Amino acid sequence: MDLFKKEENIFSVTQITNSVKRLLENSFGNVKVVGEISNFKPHFSGHWYFTLKDASAQISCTMWKSANARVRFTLEDGMKIVVSGNLSVYPPRGTYQIDVHSMQADGVGELQAAFERLKARLADEGLFNQELKKSIPTLPKKIGIVTAIDSAAFKDMVSVAQRRYPLVELFVASSRVQGEGAAENIAKNIKLLDSRGDLDVIIIGRGGGSLEDLWAFNEEIVARTIFEAKTPIISGVGHEIDFTIADFVADLRAPTPTASMELATPNKDDILNYLENYFEESTSIINSIISSFKDKISDLIISYGFKSHNHILNNNIQNLDNYLFRIENGLNNKIQKKMSELEIKSNIISSFNTDNILKRGFSLVKQDNVVISRGESFDFDKKTKIKFYDKEIEIK
Amino acid sequence: MSTKKKTFEDSLMRLKEISDLLEENEVGLDESIKLYEEGVKLAKECYKTLSEAQLKIKELKADLENDI
């Protein structure tokens, strides 16, 4: 088509814009452009709009939902990235833009910066708060693992569990741990295990690798899933020197996947030692309890309580004696009283008898107050009393 | 007592409880002897369970196709 042949050829806005659009799209094809992000706006539809700029120019960018779902880091203004996409024109505004298909952080420095920014933001939100961390149970029955089931890291975790605490049951949700969609996959598997509700702890882990390899564990979706999980989570990602966002959010950070299983399980040998000691210790304790009871018994026997028993007994015996004594006394007194009464009465009775005889004219001779009833008993040398009825006389 | 239903973890917890009770020295003689017997029995069971345990592993699969 020869556009400029006819001088009077006039385009409508749409015609010229569409011509430019066609020209642009066909002549550039796929381009890679490096620049700094500004005006980043994630639309509620899920599409992204932002501007890529450098010191002296800028260009609008769009990234559709289907494409940006695969971006493995959180976009922020100021971040330096390399985008890959097609140049295009947006007719309603008459602007040209890049339809971004994929993007990468511009070097490790940028990933590191993205890491720091996300870390700072999540820290501000309280996702790393120490007081929100759940405690890891000491005797787990069931442990969930989110990792690649064919990885060396998983084999290590299994052998640690086998060696340390084979009583535990492992529930593995095999996950992609690097590359496209890995973060979503990890998050999904964490949710899957967490939703069971019967796991004591979940380990998320993978072996060592580059910053890019470990990147899934630095993504916001993983961080938020860990934070929201109700099951305690241990992270064991990479080597000792690697810190990921997941490590900060997790309830416990293990330096390696192997260490994560060590932190999640008690040591069988420790428990076996405890049990062995238990026999010895509890036997010596029960023996000391028994002997302390023996001591108590012998203490009791010589205690005042037991002695006072004797006192009481003696007192009682004394009381009894006293009563007996008093009864005896009373009885004697009574007997004596009766006896003397009886004597008086018998005297009276007997005197009445003599009185009657004396009345009739007989008399009674007494010497030494003894009645002399026979003549041969009479002693002429003694004082003699003669008792008549009316009186008693004494003769020499 | 339903020792049948007890898990290893329960037994081990109970064992610690028993040794604490015995060490506190505040239970009576009869009770102490009962606790001692229970403890020794539990310890033997735990020992056996742990020595004979074999690791169990189950794989779970998330339904990844749905709800993305």
Image: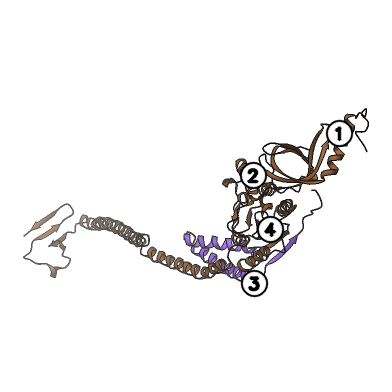
Chain colours: A brown, B purple
Contact between marks 4 and 1 (CB within 8 A): the answer is: no
Q: CA distance from mark 3 to mark 2?
A: 47 Å
Q: CA distance from mark 4 to mark 1?
A: 58 Å
- Say which chain tag 4 marks: A
Amino acid under disc 3: Glu
Badge 4: residue crowd in 10 Å (few <14, some 14–19, many ≥20): many
- Category of crowding for the residue at label 2, using alpha-carbon neighbours closer than 10 angstroms: few (below 14), some (14–19), many (at least 20): many
Residue A155 image position (x, y, % from top left): 67, 66
Q: Residue at x 21, y 54 (%)?
A: A359
Q: Residue drawn 93% across and 31% down?
A: A6
Distance between the Cα atoms at labels 3 and 1? 79 Å
What distance separates the C-alpha of mark 1 from that of mark 2? 41 Å
Horizontal arrangement in the rendering, residue B52 relative to residue A184 (left or right):
left
Callout 4–callout 2 Cβ contact below 8 Å: no
Residue type highlighted by circle 1 = Thr
* Near-viewer residue (A154 or B15): A154
Which of the two discs, 3 and 1, sits closer to the camera? Answer: 1
Residue that carries the numbered disc 2 in the rendered image: A118
Which is in the foreground here, disc 4 or disc 2? 2
C-beta proximity under 8 Å, tags 3 and 2:
no
Q: Which mark is residue A144?
A: 4
Provide the secondary structure element on which disc 2 rests.
helix
Residue A373: image quadrant is bottom left
Q: Find disc 3 in the rendering and name its residue.
A: B52
Q: Which residue is mark 1?
A: A17
Identity of the residue drawn at 88% across and 35% down: A18
Q: Chain of mark 2?
A: A
